[in-house]
Image (cartoon, coloured by chain):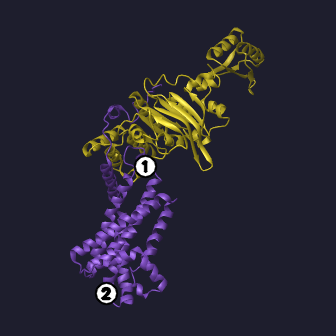
Amino acid sequence: MVSGTAQRSTSKAGGEGPLAVDAEGLVKRFGEVVAVDGLDLRVPRGVVYGVLGPNGAGKTTVIRMLATLSAPDAGRVRILGHDAASDAAEVRRRIGLTGQFASVDDDLTGRENLVLIAKLLGRRNAAARRRAGDLLAAFDLSDTADRLVKTFSGGMRRRLDIAASLVVRPDVLFLDEPTSGLDPRSRLQVWDVVRALVKRGTTVVLTTQYLEEADALADRIVVIDRGRVVAEGRPADLKLSVGAGAVRLRVADAAQRETAVRLLADATGADVVREVDPLALSVRTETDQQAVSALAALVEGGVELSDFSIGRPTLDEVFLSLTGHDTTPAEEAA
Amino acid sequence: MSTQGHTSATTPSGPQLVAALDDDERPAPAGVLRACSTFAWRGLLKIRHVPEQLVDATIGPVLLLMMFTYLFGGAIEGSTGEYLQFVLPGALVMAVLLTTTHSGIALYADRTRGVVDRFRSMPVWAPAPLVGAVVGDAVRYALAVTTVLVAGLLLGFDAAGGVPGVLAGALLVVVFAFALSWIFTAGGLALRSQSAVQSAALIGVLLPVFVSNVFVEPSTLPAVLQAVVDINPISHLTTAVRGLLSGDPAAADILLVW
């Protein structure tokens, strides 16, 4: 259950019918640079699917190929069973896209942006205006609806952008870094919308650099790095795949530390790390059960603890251990 | 997923969001015509929101017309009145051509924004945004033509061709500009930066305008330049417009423009 977990149960969550996104062997080159290098993606229906990776990992390139904006140099994309190359019109009927750089028109007002989209998607004038008004109210943009978008704040612009993708509720919604550059409150708002959409059957594919976001929001995550998949699975599975976690503790009396080391080693069978702090120890565990019994062994052995914690590895640690290099520092903004 | 208690405190939520998301309506997307007219509407909205951009389509050409008439008119033709008669059709052509550069620039500005990605990911006829933009430009051309014509008439231009001649001349210029704007549209797609588009467009318009019969009689030019002027489509356009406005249309020139 430790390392094989990433591969299991791709079909379960989606129910009957074709996958929301089924991409095979995607390759995209820009001159000499291979941005996407043989990438497979299988997104079941009705989930939030997180595409996680640092800047330059190829996330946006992948999204653009999935959303019919750029043709892959190799491989194929199917959205709900429709081929993105030969049946782009049908795919476009079913998807929504909110790009990394707000896909709204700066020179129009917020309302005009939504009316424009509504008209293009087939609503007549009055119906288009009504739909725009409803969405503006829903996204708390009514007060600023008649201002030009270029005067909007980042959060307002992003909300408008997402609203524009929902003029007709799409079956598959692509969100390319929907929360980058947003304040924490606006991020939570976006998360709420995503959750509400998934409840209504929309599949959301979102890219993010925020590990915390993928953890909080996504049912499944694919970690990509340099245009390749380095891991795929549920967030919890990914954390498990680098070990369930670690027990960190401090003994009350430094004299008891070696006793504690022996007891922990017996209980877990793993190497016990003596931290720089003369009272502190840590040991990696494979399961939560093991962590609990290790602590129990200490209590039975009469070792007094001043502090302890059982921690899961963070997705940062997961990323580091999967890709061998750190995520970029810029993303720690939140 | 854990649903935290923040839901009620944050803004886009509550019954309005629920209602907006519950909307299941999925009409058939707009057809080619409706898509084009919707994008044309977008072009008009942009003019309405930034009316300053019309300055280069209206006041600019009028200033140039007056400058050429009163500054150089006496020197070139002997009298400002006569030169006006000669230069107005050319000024008309120039005014509209300068306006066409806007197409490429606007398109470039569009392309560098994400909004084009959104349009392209939607189930609408792919060229519709371009058609819409160009239709929006037609309004600009019409305005430029009208302004210069009115200014010319106020300054004393004698339109011997009468109303039909004036209308036909204006129409010819607009149609030509329309065709030319596609070149700038293509340029807007091909070039790398907005300033590149801007300067390319300016050179691409000003050079042929000056090396033509817009401002001077080609017969006063060196032979080499005369040859260039003769094959310059802008010369033919200007001749044709002159003919139409003065009531002496040369069918050959109009056809040549086509």
> Picture coordinates of residue A273 (x, y %)?
74, 23
Question: Which color is chain B depicted in?
Answer: purple
| Residue type, numbered disc 2 | Glu
Where on the picture, by quarter, is residue B142? bottom left
| Image location of residue A77, percent across then percent down | 49, 37
Q: Amino acid at mark 1?
A: Val
Give the answer, above or below, for where B141 lies relative to B68.
above
Q: Residue at x 69, y 11 (%)?
A: A297
What colour denotes chain A? yellow
> Can you name the residue that lies furthest to the left here?
B163
What chain letter is assigned to the residue under label 1? B
Residue at the image position 30 percent from the left and 51 percent from the top? B33
For the image shown, how many numbered marks are present on the structure? Answer: 2
**Residue at label 1?**
B115
B18 or A300, which lies in front?
Answer: B18
Asked if residue A311 shows in the view, the reply is no
Q: Position of residue B181 (x, y in %)?
A: 39, 64
> Are the two marked residues, 2 and 1, in contact with CB atoms closer than 8 angstroms?
no
Task: Locate residue A115 relative to residue A12 in the image: left or right.
Answer: left
For label 2, the SS is helix
